[in-house]
Amino acid sequence: MIVLRTENLKKYYGEVRALDGVSIQIDEGELLAVIGPSGSGKTTLLRSIAGFVQLDEGRIYIKGRDVTDLPPEKRNVAMFFQNYALWPHMSVFDNVAYGLKVRKLSKEKVREKVEWALNFLDIGHLAGRKPNQLSGGQQQRVALARAIVVEPDLLLLDEPLSNLDAKIRMRIRFELRDILKKLNIATLYVTHDQEEALSIADKIAVMNNGKVLQIGEPREIYRKPKDLFVADFVGVNCVVKTEAERLRRIGLDISGQREVNLVIRAEEVVLDRMNVPLTKRSNDLLLNGQIIGKQYLGAKIRYEIKLKDLDENIFINSEENFELNEQVHILVREGSYFIY
Ligand code: ADP
Ligand code: MG
């Protein structure tokens, strides 16, 4: 069943096109991650669906019902913000119960549902604590319990992990995915972190300038990016602007345009000394270069390499220790580079 469908959403703030014709769809139990740089319209999209932004154009359907003109509380969606402020003076129980009390449920019903949500998230034992007696990860679970306790049709998460430090974030990422999958709830998950999105989402929508440029499974977004923006936004890349003629000279079979952009997935290349042979298959790209810069990063070293055939510099990380000025070659497998 389709839980969310948006149709050509538009929202302009003066000259700024925060949403410029956004159509997306989320199925039951599906986790759609929306990624894009800061200012691309992610939060505006989420807030429109929640009912906090008045659209200039477009319709929003939740479980087939047109909710475009309904106020937030009539949409049966739950939102979970980047700074999931819990009420500091209330216990965990009361924080989670709040939304149910507003809906005027009986005391027994409230207790039953809050206990379910707390136990579901393994925080039943924290019910009596105040937010300042909880760790960041625990607070986050409480906020999530508060969002799911009202049994929404759709869960909206806006950068839910951005408040946590890098180590905890990695762990919680997978916990969160497990929880959402167990709940089997349709979720729209906004993040600027493409790695987070690739690792937890069923599908990804890439946004820029108020437009969705591509929607697909993580693998499809990574392996078959539709345009230069998507290719460069996901993964760790080098982008080289060059003449098509130069690429033909190094064996690429491309026609058409004079100037092209070559995107190389820098995290997937093989970099080695000239005297170490690299086996090139027919559609692989083999580039010659020279190390012209070197920066120590710990486990890896970041090299600046001057590409001879393309007359451009790129950056590649490697565990190997190369010398400055050393001649190297770089094997880029078919599928690890894109041309636009
Ligand atoms: P993101 O969440 O992807 O960083 P936003 O949706 O917050 O992006 O913003 C998209 C664009 O719309 C930005 O250029 C932002 O400055 C603008 N914008 C968002 N909300 C408002 C507002 N209330 N008033 C004016 N401009 C806004
Ligand atoms: Mg935002």
Image (cartoon, rainbow, N blue to C red):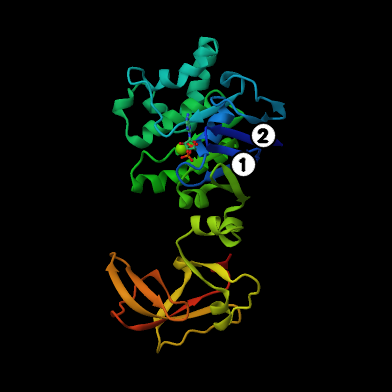
User: Could you say which quadrant of the image residue 292 lies in?
Assistant: bottom left
For numbered disc 2, what is the local secondary structure? strand
- 275 or 182, which lies in front? 275
Residue found at x 52% / y 34%: 44
Pointer 1 residue Cβ closer than 8 Å to ligand 1:
no
- 99 or 54, which lies in front? 54
- 50 or 137, which lies in front? 50
Asked whether residue 41 is in view, the answer is yes
Categorize mark 1 by other alpha carbons within 10 Å: few (<14), some (14-19), many (20+). many
Residue found at x 46% / y 52%: 195
Label number found at residue 113:
none
User: Residue 332: x percent and y percent?
Assistant: 51, 74
The quadrant of the picture occupied by the C terminus is bottom right
Categorize mark 2 by other alpha carbons within 10 Å: few (<14), some (14-19), many (20+). many
For label 2, the residue is 3
For label 1, the residue is 30
Q: Would residue 68 be found to the left or right of residue 183 on screen? A: right
Pointer 2 residue Cβ closer than 8 Å to ligand 1:
no
> What amino acid type is highlighted by mark number 2?
Val
For numbered disc 1, what is the local secondary structure? loop
Residue found at x 42% / y 29%: 142
User: Residue 230: x percent and y percent?
Assistant: 55, 55
User: Residue 231: x percent and y percent?
Assistant: 54, 59
Q: Would residue 60 be found to the left or right of residue 84 on screen? A: right
User: Residue 17: x percent and y percent?
Assistant: 55, 38
> What amino acid type is highlighted by mark number 1?
Glu
Residue found at x 41% / y 17%: 94
Sequence-first disc among 2 and 1: 2
Q: Are marks 2 and 1 in contact (CB under 8 Å)?
A: yes
Asked whether residue 202 is in view, the answer is no
